[in-house]
Amino acid sequence: MRRPNGAARRGALIGLYSMCFIGAMPVGHLFTGLLAQHFGVRTTLLLPGMLMTIGVAAIFVPRWLSPGRIELNCARV
């Protein structure tokens, strides 16, 4: 994305970024409302928390357990 003419395209890029994330929120809120009506508020709030925890664990636990992991030794720095 780094180009000499990057300043001229920055507004278009920020507009696209905002449209992707802010424009998708109403769809997510609709889905959350439907889940809350069907399962209840407690389950609706618990489900994304559990999914996020599983996602973070799936990404970071293999990195923490890998044998070739780089350790930072603050005593030498």
Image: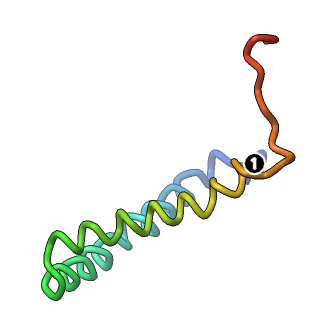
Residue located 28% across and 67% down the image: 46
Left or right of 29 on screen, residue 61? right
Q: Residue furthest right?
A: 68
Compare residues 76 and 65 and report the one nearer the observer.
65
Residue located 81% across and 37% down the image: 70
To which quarter of the image does residue 49 belong? Answer: bottom left
Q: Mark 1 falls on what kind of element?
A: loop
Left or right of 23 on screen, residue 57? right
Quarter of the picture holding the C terminus: top right
Compare residues 15 and 46 and report the one nearer the observer.
46
Mark 1: amino acid? Arg
Compare residues 29 and 59 and report the one nearer the observer.
59
**Above or below for 8 versus 54:** above
Compare residues 1 and 39 and report the one nearer the observer.
39
To which quarter of the image does residue 31 belong? Answer: bottom left
Residue located 53% across and 65% down the image: 55
Which residue matches tag 1? 2
Q: Few, some or many C-alpha atoms within 10 Å of disc 1 (few <14, some 14-19, many ≥20)?
A: few
